[in-house]
Image: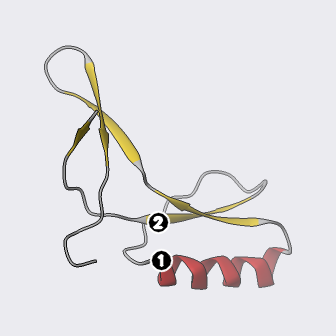
C-alpha cells in the first residue's frame, strides 16, 4: 500500500442520525462538535479519523493510507 501525503481530517458521527458531512481540520474541533451534538441529542457520538482513501487513476482502483502532515 502506497503512502502519500493527504491533509488529515476528522468527522463526527451521531449514532442514528445519518452520515457525517463536515470535515474538521483538527481533532479538537471534532471533539468540540461531538460534545455539542451530545448535549443536543443524548445519543452516542463518534469522532472518526480518516485513515485511508481510494481513487481511480487509469484502470484499477488504488488504495492509499493517509499520513499526518509534517510537524503535526
Of residues 42 and 26, the one nearer the viewer is 26
Above or below 18: residue 56: above
* 39 relative position to 8: left or right: right
Depth check, front residue: 70 or 59? 70
Establish if 42 lies above or below 49. Answer: below
Contact check, label 2 and label 1, Cβ < 8 Å:
yes
Where disc 1 sits, the SS reads helix
Disc 2 marks which residue? 10
Q: Quadrant of residue 25?
A: bottom left
Q: Secondary structure at mark 2?
A: strand
Q: CA distance from mark 2 to mark 1?
A: 6 Å
Bin the neighbour count of mark 2 within 10 Å (Cα to Cα): few under 14, some 14-19, many 20 and up: many
Which residue is located at x 23 percent, y 68 percent?
Answer: 69
x and y percentages locating residue 19 in the rendered image? 61, 51
Question: Residue 2 at what x, y percent from top left?
Answer: 22, 37
Give the tally of numbered discs.
2
Q: Which residue is mark 1?
A: 27
N-terminal label among 2 and 1 = 2
| Quadrant of the image occupied by residue 1 | top left
Specify the farthest residue to the left. Answer: 58
Percent across and percent down for residue 39 are: 79, 84
Name, please, the residue furthest toward the right.
Answer: 42
Please state which of residues 21 and 26 is positioned toward the viewer in this rendering: 26
Q: Which quarter of the image is occupied by the C terminus? A: bottom left
Q: Residue 2 or 58: which is nearer the viewer?
A: 2
Q: Which residue: 18% across, 14% down?
A: 59
Height in image: 50 above or below 32?
Answer: above
Residue drawn where x is 59% and y is 85% of the image:
32
Amino acid at each position: 500500500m502506497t503512502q502519500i501525503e493527504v491533509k488529515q481530517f476528522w468527522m463526527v458521527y451521531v449514532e442514528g442520525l445519518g452520515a457525517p458531512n463536515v470535515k474538521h481540520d483538527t481533532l479538537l474541533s471534532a471533539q468540540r462538535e461531538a460534545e455539542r451534538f451530545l448535549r443536543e441529542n443524548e445519543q452516542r457520538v463518534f469522532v472518526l479519523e480518516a485513515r485511508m482513501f481510494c481513487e481511480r487513476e487509469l484502470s484499477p482502483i488504488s488504495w492509499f493510507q493517509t499520513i499526518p502532515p509534517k510537524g503535526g
